[in-house]
Amino acid sequence: MSSPSAPWRATTRTRTGTLVALLALALIVAGLVLPAFASRRLIQDLFYILTMLSLAQIWNLLAGYGGLVSVGQQAFVGIGAYALFGGVILGGMDPLLAILLGGAAGLVLAIPMAFFAFRLHGAYFAIGTWVIAETTRLLVAQWKALGGGTGTSLPRAATSDMMGVAQVAELFGVRDAAARDILAYWIALLLAVALIAGIYALLRSRLGLALIAVRDNAEAAGSVGVDVRWLKWAVFLIASVATGLTGALIFLQTARISPDAAFAITDWTAYVIFIVVIGGIGTIEGPILGVLVFFALRSTLADYGSWYLLTLGLTAIVAMIFAPKGLWGLLSARTGWHLFPIRHRLLGPTGE
């Protein structure tokens, strides 16, 4: 009687993915100790890259995997930032703890926003989210306790006494302002890592497979038992919380806020869409590559005024024509690289 053969199994793990995981762990450790050697300017630049990467990954989850093309994400950035300022100025909270209010405020805003926006489809959904974001900006501009239309700043005493600042200043031998930048950078690093890891884990699960099915064909997904409505609500609410947290962190670092800055569609939605489209929508690797390209263009051309925006627009048009799947899609097609593999492969008894 022959012995039973070893079973076949499905896996998403690849040698490249394992190597990337080890490299990513090394980069995270390096990023945590970097403030001991880096200049304050570099820390501020990395903070900007990491927060934009977080916003790009969130929008990519919505549009690239969920099919929810929102152009109103600035609403959650702004409401998260104003929640932090309200908690600090009106509630006397520590700014570090008040970041959590940003996520809570994003969730509170997302519920009525989704209630109305989910009754729209396609371009109407996108326009609807933008209209709600603009309405939110106008309402917040009436909040006189936080400066109304001109905005306000965080109290110097609150930022100086912020939790962790004294310890970071003593650890690295820097002033309080530099210590706040380091602390904000560390939080941005952990937030970006948590978002990428969370999205990757989601996409490898059955829930992620259902989400992609809804994006491709909602009616077909519903016919095989996927709760389309619940899934869209869940993804939208998760994205709103994450965006609110990121917005609160961004304006904690700047310590100054106004409605026009907090709800700027160019800064918090248009640039984010550019990053995702350039890098490759529907991939985790795309926003990572896209944010590096965006930052390089920003650093090189930001002093040229309208030429900067013109170059971004031309770059996006060229990319959509010659690389419709983004720079990462073009690179992946030629090399076969998948740094975050989510496709299941069937392995036999020998592992091949």
Image (cartoon, helix red, strand yellow):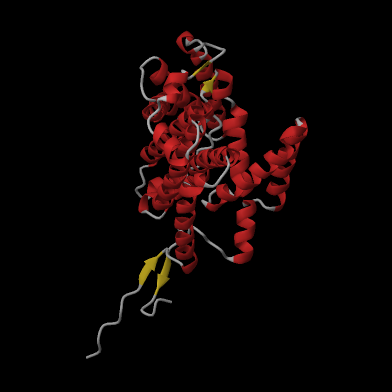
**Residue 255: image x %, image y %?**
51, 24
Residue 66 locus on image (x, y percent): 47, 43
Name the quadrant containing residue 195.
top left
Horizontally, residue 91 falls left or right of residue 330, namely: left
Q: Count of labels shown? A: 0
Viewer-nearest residue: 104 or 70? 104
- Residue displayed at 60% across by 60% down: 332
Residue lying furthest left: 1
User: Looking at this view, is 10 or 30 the one in front?
Assistant: 30
Which of the 4 image quarters holds residue 344? bottom left
Does residue 4 appear left or right of residue 107 in this picture?
left
Q: Nearer the viewer, residue 48 or 31?
A: 31
- Residue at 39% from the left image edge and 36% from the top image edge: 167
For residue 12, which quarter of the picture? bottom left
Most extreme residue toward the bottom, as rendered? 1
Left or right: 219 with respect to 336?
left
Quarter that holds the C terminus: bottom left
Visible residue check, residue 239: no
25 or 267: nearer the viewer: 25
Rendered position, 25 above or below 196: below
Query: Which quarter of the rendering shows the N terminus?
Result: bottom left
Query: Can you give x and y, in whole percent of width and height, for residue 58 in the image?
Result: 48, 40
Q: In this orientation, does residue 146 appear?
A: yes
* Residue 277 spot, x, y in % from top left: 62, 45
